[in-house]
Image (cartoon, rainbow, N blue to C red):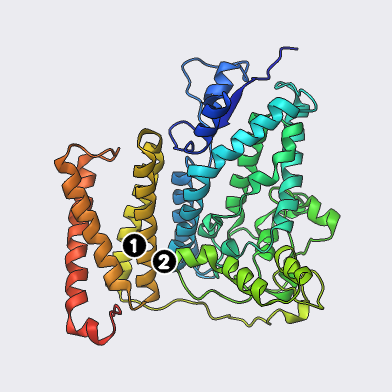
Amino acid sequence: MEDRHAPNILITGTPGTGKSILGQELAVRTGLKYVNIGDLAKENNFFEDWDEERECHVLDEDRATPFFIMMILVEFVVTTLKKDISPARLNDSISSISAGMMAQFVSGIFLKSVFAFLYMYIHENYRLVDLPWDSHVTWWTAFITVEFFYYWFHRMSHAHQGHHSSEDYNLTTALRQSAFQHASFFMIPMALVVPPAAYSVHFQFNILYQFWLHTELVTSLGFLEYVLNTPSHHRVHHGRNPYCIDKNYGGTLIIFDRLFGTFAKEDEKVVYGLTHPLNTWDPIWVQVCHLTHIWKTFCATPGLTNKLSVLFKGPGWSPGKPRLGCIEDIPKVTHPEPKYGRQIPTFWSVYVAGHFAMAVIFYQELFAVAEGVTTLACLGRIAFLIWTLSSIAAIMDKTPSATALDFSRCLTYVLFDTFTRLWGPPAVMLPHLVMNAMLGLYLVSAVIQGVNLLSPFTKANNGKLE
């Protein structure tokens, strides 16, 4: 059989997505060839019927974004028409998508390439077997192994509170991810057996499969419920009802939950979210709230053994309790359970929706140009996007600093865009018409927020938007 192993290659995700700031540096320092997975497949003839005229694309989270948006809109229309399911709320949806963007700033720009380097290096130097590319054994091994490792990662890393902090359950919830929780690094032992590209394909499939699980539109899939992870099973996983706690960790399959005693069937109506809600849309706090809680608990807990237990046991643990805490401590739920969300005028709802849409455009543009700009320029784009998401959240939270925060953001954009154009065309891929329209919208927004900031009514309300 033809040897399909490709030596001395560092695999990245897709071409032109900017996942290289750290990984490319590692490749240079260690002498590995730095390519994307599509080029690797083509160069090594991984597919026997390869068409030279066909471009290879890998469907990862970045390339899947337009598909995600389309499905979110379809779900919103259907749930609005059905009446018996609450459609997605604007504030919660923005918060969920913002969390996903924050996660990609960390993993997509930095950590994925680092993981790719580690995985490839271990497989290149320490693999136990050479699995052929054209063998079904290789692909089934990769599929089952990825699912097995994902189950244990999911179970051991719980509770990933950033992902579970939404009190709604819809397709936007799938995008609410933690910036500091990466299943990839838990998969490193797979490098001893599974080839990198086979791992990459099945890991991406595992993650992308879970997108459609986050919906209330699908009730039951019949006999498939015994094998596959389904929306019904995953709704239990997201519930804060006592019977839902620490259940249904699977990614694509539910068999490991059944085998290891963590399966629960959907019973009473599920109430979603954390047992102790965040009550904010702040994207930074969504990412760090649990880390802050762990640190405060760690400092307040006496004894080294107990301090270590704070780090490695469940969030409900305290001295004298079981590893995961006591189920009796879980707050009882009511129906309907009140959800966090402050009412803002329709004008400001349209305002935040418009600025969030522009943020999504900038996000897509960031990954399109990241490999062609300096690290400083890339970090600058990320900083402005985080500023934008925080400003939008402040408006939705009606915080006292919202007006000043957003005015300074809009003014900064106008000044930066204007002055950089004096030095030549900007290093962006957006059409000039779009850039000019955005500049105009930011200018109008700066004027609106400036007037709002200086108005006596705003001052009387400590800067709150009314």
Residue 20 place in picture, x, y as percent: 48, 36
Residue 238 place in picture, x, y as percent: 64, 65
Q: Secondary structure at mark 2?
A: helix
Q: Quadrant of the N terminus?
A: top right
Q: Which residue is mark 2?
A: 90
Q: Is residue 289 left or right of residue 365?
A: right
Which residue is at a point 69% across and 47% down the rendered structure image?
Answer: 252
Q: Is residue 31 left or right of residue 69?
A: right
Between 139 and 371, the residue placed more toward the observer is: 371
Q: Quadrant of the C terminus?
A: bottom left
Residue 435 place in picture, x, y as percent: 22, 46
Other-residue count near label 2 (Cα within 10 Å), few / some / many at <14 / 14–19 / ≥20: some
Residue type of the residue flagged with mark 1:
Ala
> Residue 136 is drawn in which quadrant?
top right
| Looking at the image, residue 108 lies above or below residue 78 | above
Q: Is residue 107 visible?
A: yes
Which residue is at a point 76% across and 71% down the rendered structure image?
Answer: 306
Marks 2,1: beta carbons within 8 A: yes
Which residue is at a point 70% across and 22% down the rendered structure image?
Answer: 133
Q: Secondary structure at mark 1?
A: helix
Which residue is at a point 44% across and 50% down the rendered structure image?
Answer: 69
Q: Residue furthest bottom?
A: 460
Q: Residue furthest left?
A: 422
Between 227 and 109, the residue placed more toward the observer is: 109
Whole-angstrom CA distance, mark 2 to mark 1, is: 8 Å
Other-residue count near label 1 (Cα within 10 Å), few / some / many at <14 / 14–19 / ≥20: some
Marks 2 and 1, the one that precedes in the sequence: 2
Q: Which residue is mark 1?
A: 353
| Looking at the image, residue 193 lies above or below residue 465 | above
| Looking at the image, residue 421 lies above or below residue 303 | above
Residue type of the residue flagged with mark 2:
Leu
Between 319 and 335, the residue placed more toward the observer is: 319
